[in-house]
Image (cartoon, helix red, strand yellow):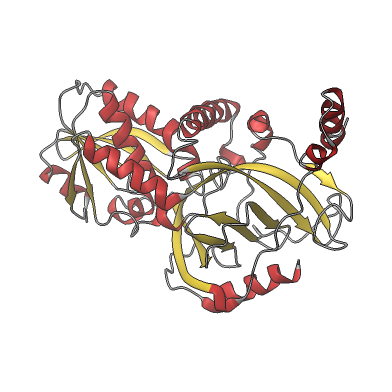
Amino acid sequence: MQRRHLLAAGAAGLALPASALEFAAPRPPVAMRLSPDRIIDITVGIRPFRAQGPRLQIQRLHGKTVVHHYGHGGSGWSLSWGSAQRALALVQAAGLKPGQRLAVVGAGAIGLTTARWAQQAGYPVRLYGKDRAPRVHSSAATGLWTPESRIVTSAHASPEWMSDWEAMARDAFQVHQSYLGLSSGPVQWHDGYVVGDVGFDQPVPNPYAGEPDYPDLAPHVADLRPQGLALAAGEHPFGLRHARRFTQLVFNIPAYQRLLWEDFMRDGGRWQPHELRSTRDFARLPETVVVNCTGDGARMLLGDASMTPVRGQTARLIPQPEVDYALIYRGQGIVALPRRDGLLVATMAPGDFGSSDLRPDRTQSEDAVRRLAHLF
């Protein structure tokens, strides 16, 4: 039975008035106001992709115990809490006792959540970093819960790896859920539409062309997302195009970062602006155990050739609070997402894989906004 039929049947059983039935039917979405003159900011961030998946490993460097915790690709926010739990287990395996100070290097999504987990386990934490939000790559993320985004290549996705990844994704998901309902709205559920010019059974251009082959991990956590519903023409505002409705967890990243930072400082966290330029800089830190959450910075800091930068650009349009749905343009590499700080339009472009170019390309974002506008 379709959802609208189920609601109507339930309402009839309760003898509700006809006016109540009107609220049971899904409301048509408010059109997004999409024009280049509404762009108020363009940000570029670098996804720290590692073909083998995130690096979670203990290493002795210059007299320090370093727990490496980086390389989460496009899944940093999504996997953060689950991955942080595993990094903390390595800290404990290294012999650091609660009450002894821990150093965390990097103030992005991975660094902040690692610091928070450590605090909750009884460790005083000093956080080091070149920058903090909003001047970190994590601030430029779109904000969809996508734990499978550029996280590993098919060649490295063994059954054991996938089992560990799934557990990490589920652990993170549970913690994200605990932030629902807060007044600042750091985590919310949003409906959305995947829209395409051809049917979903037909191929479309691959926005990941030129990149490695990624495994299809989504089915492993399919129960954590409501299943999409195909819509007939007339059931959506996109004309004769093909559309599917979905529901997705969304992060309002500025609010989330601010909340994590305030919680970190409230619980005695200490912040030290400090850029590590070589592995010898670990020796200069007073703490004996250091968690290295430097993301893409690990390429230069450690000379880690397994890391590949992946450029991502996001335009922020004037907030449109009445828009409460996400929009994915299938095969075009474009995502629009409603957040409290604005309507975000994220793009993928040829050449992003392997690029660490942080210069915004306004033409790219304006073109994406115009293409989305045509959907309405």
Residue drawn at x 21%, y 55% is: 275
Give percent across and percent down for residue 296: 38, 53
Quarter where residue 102 is shown: top left
Residue drawn at x 59%, y 63% is: 348
Q: Is residue 77 left or right of residue 189?
A: left
Residue drawn at x 10%, y 39% is: 286
Observer-nearest of 75 and 266: 266
Give percent across and percent down for residue 318: 52, 67
Quarter where residue 121 is shown: top left
Give percent across and percent down for residue 84: 38, 33
**Residue 231 shows in this picture:** yes
Give percent across and percent down for residue 30: 70, 59
- Quarter of the picture containing the C terminus is bottom right
**Residue 353 shows in this picture:** no
Relative vertical location of residue 142 with respect to residue 262 in this rendering, above or below: below
Quarter where residue 6 is shown: top right
Relative vertical location of residue 157 with respect to residue 46 in this rendering, above or below: above
